[in-house]
DNA sequence: AAAATTAATTCGGCAAACGAACTATCATTC
DNA sequence: GAATGATAGTTCGTTTGCCGAATTAATTTT
């Protein structure tokens, strides 16, 4: 493996570590766990949605989503409503209290990052965005390419 | 928040998601859980070390490290040795079997990423490395800056 | 109307993670 | 050099996350 590949992987790990650390700190501060926080964020982004959709976005099973929603609901942060056209569905919404919780816990790391990012000269911002998107696409492509390998390896066992 | 800041944060999330997804796939494949795998990786990097050091690097509590090491040791992947100069310490090392396990589970995603990365023209590799390191430094700086905010917010509660 | 599908939940079980309490070992200090 | 304090690691009890399998209820297909 070449030198620059190593360097890029190391930088990636630093990025992962920083965001992991931040997620844990945020959890401690809000009294919510990281997965619970992620569910709230999803609700904040998309508004009303279903457990199935949440599971897909958070990449966890539906059973786990049910458990998380039980917790959040018991704290009065979210609520369930039966679907009217399709009564199998359950629509999840943030309560006022849930919105307030999110508002009172602004994402400090993202905000600080935004401040520092926006202080950069225009050309550099553009370059960073392009680079990040490029790396993300490389990783996604790698993930897809690697999937069959992983499957065949699993069969071998 | 500006448009490009949004774009960079979205790209960052895509990167996080890809690596998270990969970590889970790797766990399933090796029969080890992600935290267990992380401990093995740390041991592979630094060689002999103590539970305290592992806890610091993985950013988990010492109690959790003890539990993880119990699991790894019961599978014969790691071993404990009492410290000689300071008998309170316990030195953790990979066994041959542990090293073999790591060797037999190459990091497919990293390798695919490496292949794709190394196929890029020279100038682009250089740009991506610089960008990733820049972003990592922004995030680390943001993390440090955000820390006092988080603390004071915690006190307010 | 029967069969298949779909959405969500319940249940059982394992792993992770933490704080608090505890043991054993240094290190200080009086 | 005995008492006190600090440190490294473990144990214990509890909460949480997570999943697969089975279940219930509603909808769609045949």
Image (cartoon, coloured by chain):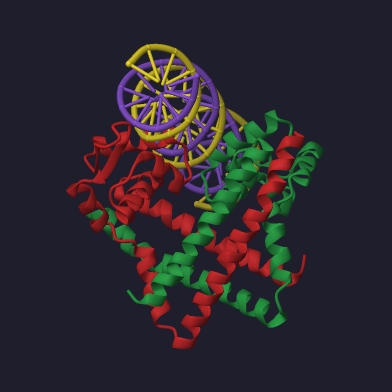
Chain colours: A green, B red, C purple, D yellow
Who is closer to the viewer here, C24 or B77? C24
Q: Is residue A77 visible?
A: no
In the image, is A53 to the left or to the right of B16?
A: right
Q: Position of residue A86 (x, y in %)?
A: 69, 44
Quadrant housing the N terminus of chain A: bottom left
Residue found 32% across the figure and 49% down from its top: B40
Question: B120 above or below B13?
Answer: below
> Total number of numbered labels?
0
Residue found 69% across the figure and 42% down from its top: B151
Who is closer to the viewer here, B46 or C4? B46
Q: Position of residue C29 (x, y in %)?
A: 49, 25
In the image, is A115 to the left or to the right of B11?
A: right
Question: B11 above or below B50?
Answer: below
Q: Quarter-wise, where is residue A112 in the image?
A: bottom right
Question: C23 above or below A130?
Answer: above
Q: Position of residue A106 (x, y in %)?
A: 74, 49
Residue found 46% across the figure and 56% down from its top: B21
Residue found 39% across the figure and 80% down from its top: B118
In the image, is A71 to the left or to the right of A134?
A: right
Q: Quarter-wise, where is residue A123 in the image?
A: bottom right
Q: Is residue A104 visible?
A: yes
Who is closer to the viewer here, B88 or B107? B88
Q: Position of residue B124 (x, y in %)?
A: 50, 84
């Amino acid at each position: 493996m070449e030198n620059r590949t190593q360097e890029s992987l190391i930088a990636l790990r630093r990025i992962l570590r920083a965001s992991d650390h931040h997620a844990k700190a945020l959890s401690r501060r809000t009294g919510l766990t990281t997965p619970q926080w992620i569910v709230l964020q999803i609700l904040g982004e998309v508004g009303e949605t279903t457990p199935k959709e949440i599971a897909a976005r958070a990449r966890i099973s539906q059973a786990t989503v049910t458990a998380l929603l039980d917790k959040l609901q018991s704290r009065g942060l979210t609520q369930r409503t039966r679907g009217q056209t399709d009564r199998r569905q359950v629509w999840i919404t943030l309560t006022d209290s849930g919105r307030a919780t999110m508002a009172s816990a602004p994402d400090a790391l993202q905000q600080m990052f935004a401040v520092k990012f926006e202080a950069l000269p225009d050309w550099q911002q553009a370059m960073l965005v392009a680079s990040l998107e490029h790396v993300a696409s490389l990783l996604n492509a790698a993930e897809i390419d690697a999937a069959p390998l992983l499957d065949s390896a699993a069969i071998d066992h």
